Image: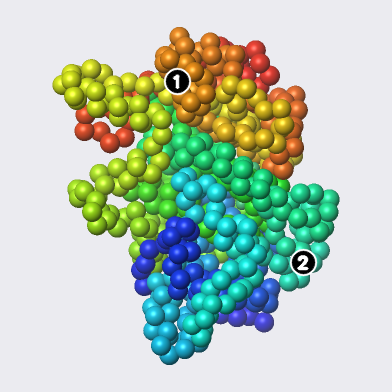
Amino acid sequence: MSRDRYVVKGPQGVANRLEINDFIKNEAHFSLYVQALIKLQQKDQSEVDSFFQIGGIHGLPAAEWDPPRAPQGDARWLGYCTHEDVLFPTWHRPYMILMEQAIQEEAMKIAETYKPELKERFKKAALKLRQPYWDWAKNSVPPPEVISKDRLTIIVFNGEEGSVANPFRRYTFNPLVPSFGFPEPFDKWQTTLRHPRDETDPNTTENIDRLKSWMQCTQTDIRDKTYFMLFCVHTWPQFSNRTASNNSKDANHAPHDGPSVIRGNSVEAIHDAIHLNIGGGGHMADTNVAGFDPIFYMHHAQVDRLLSLWAFLNPDVWVTPSTSLNGTWTIPKGDPIDKNTDLTPFWNAQPEYWTSARIMDTASLGYTYPDFDRPLPGEPTGPLPTIIAENINRLYAGATFNKLLSQRAVAESQDSAAQLRVWEWTARIHVKKYEVGGSFSIPLFVGSVPENPEECTPESCGNCLTRLDNIVEGFAHLNNALLTRSGLESLESSDVMPYLKENLHWRAAKASGEAIELSRLPSLEVEVTATRLTLPPGSIFPVAEETIIYHEITEGKQGGARSGEA
Ligand SMILES: N[C@@H](Cc1ccc(O)cc1)C(=O)O
């Protein structure tokens, strides 16, 4: 039976998406969202706006979502989502407003059921209700309301407190059937899971302590990566996706860094690491089924917020033409893609599909972020770009920036024109993603290596999928570890080079934490660079002067630099 096309228009009105830690404090918003999410999760799995159908757009069950557009070609990737190409950040934007719209529609109905004295308040809250984002760059461990509480207390229709099963913690498939084609071990788990203890056990439990300690331990790494991406990445290929610069000459891939271009991660690379660390071998760690974990939506709202911030800082840059490396359910592998490519299956009201060109302005899609409200009461005023950049420094700048700031303060107090400079040490990791079959990461250690491979891996990068022979890249910023753990007097190469030669180590690990022999990753290449950063007078962000590659630090080690090779 045919049905009307589901128009993805986003929520009504325009309102801020809130950070999850603020969101849970907002009684009316939280109560409505929780009940709306429960409603979507309880809908029949065949309903177009059920949590199951929306979650299934991303990857499996590789079914068409509203209404048919024949799958094409020999697409390798059987979901609609785009990864490892220039559409990664923009495809997920209409995806998020679809969830936001479905939630708001339910929330409006729920608000109508509140007792008369509360109805207006809850209806107003429903109008302003938006998808919360989880700012993992600042709060890497999600609040208990998302990861550990089994039940949540909310204000229900009669104004009293009610206790409900926590819909942020998991989705229960209703039912789970073999035709979904879920790969092992997801074919036997009735609910989504984070950090499952035993992949072979259909009734396994979650190791939430491990989830917390992994997220806690990567906090500085995630923050530094986010900061460097925001201020030092300026091109769309480099910002949007993690395929490596030397993968091909295609514009899809980050260009070779020029001598003075510091290396930063793509938003996709940072996002991948969150998937793996939250999933820990569970649903979030696998693209096929990640969309079924309710945390996916607050994670991707953060990716979307970073897209908004980055685009604000780089106003003339948006999706550049390229080709689809992996293909999707509707885009054949190798097809050209650009800002006018249909972002299927999301129809807008015209009716046509949303495209990247049509979604630049989030206010027209019904939402914005508190970052753009600035200045907040009590904050200094000034031009918006300055305020936003200063806020990014306040939220995410780490050891390198603080060193530059203190140098600047000294120079200013002495009225001297001394040059302000800090070397930023960065490891660049390159690896073929198909090499071990399944996602993996390359944890780096500065100083001692913990004996237990499951232990905290504070600097890491390089996550991979099974799909193709693509080379992916990621960067790990080492200054924080050097300043806090090495005991070195300076960041000059005379100190750092010999130290890192001795003390920089890496491993490979599956998403579950299980170690992988480095000999199984012949393509792996870890290379260290140093970029000289300055903070010129009047500049809010550091500026890169030159980058030097130090092959000798990792050369000769397994997975180290191969100098002289192209
Ligand atoms: N599989 C990705 C991580 C990831 C997981 C789920 C996703 O939906 C997206 C990305 C990696 O190996 O890095």
Q: Left of 214 or right of it: where is 239?
A: left
Q: Is residue 421 above or below residue 378?
A: above
Q: Residue shown at 46%/36% (left/top)?
A: 224
Quadrant including the C terminus: top right
The one of 253 and 281 positioned closer to us in this rendering: 281
Q: Is residue 258 above or below residue 151?
A: above
Residue type pointed to by label 2 = Leu
Q: Residue shown at 42%/38% (left/top)?
A: 227
In the rendered image, residue 42, in percent from the top left (x then y), is placed at 66, 75
User: Badges 1 and 2: C-beta atoms under 8 Å apart?
Assistant: no
Dot 1: element:
strand
Q: Disc 1 and disc 2: Cα gap in Å?
A: 50 Å
For label 1, the residue is 530
Which one is earlier in the sequence, the residue at label 1 or at label 2?
Answer: 2
Query: Is label 2's Cβ within 8 Å of ligand 1?
Result: no
Q: Left of 263 or right of it: where is 453?
A: right
* Mark 2 neighbour density, 10 Å: few (under 14) some (14–19) many (20 or more): some
Q: Residue shown at 37%/49% (left/top)?
A: 309
Q: Does any portion of residue 1 appear in the rendered image?
A: yes
Dot 2: element:
loop
* Mark 1 neighbour density, 10 Å: few (under 14) some (14–19) many (20 or more): many
Give the quarter of the image for residue 316.
Answer: top left
Q: Left of 409 or right of it: where is 533?
A: right
Give the quarter of the image for residue 119.
Answer: bottom left
In the rendered image, residue 392, in percent from the top left (x then y), is placed at 35, 43
For label 2, the residue is 176
Numbered badge on residue 555:
none
In the rendered image, residue 8, in percent from the top left (x then y), is placed at 49, 70
Residue type pointed to by label 1 = Ala
Q: Residue lying farthest front?
A: 160
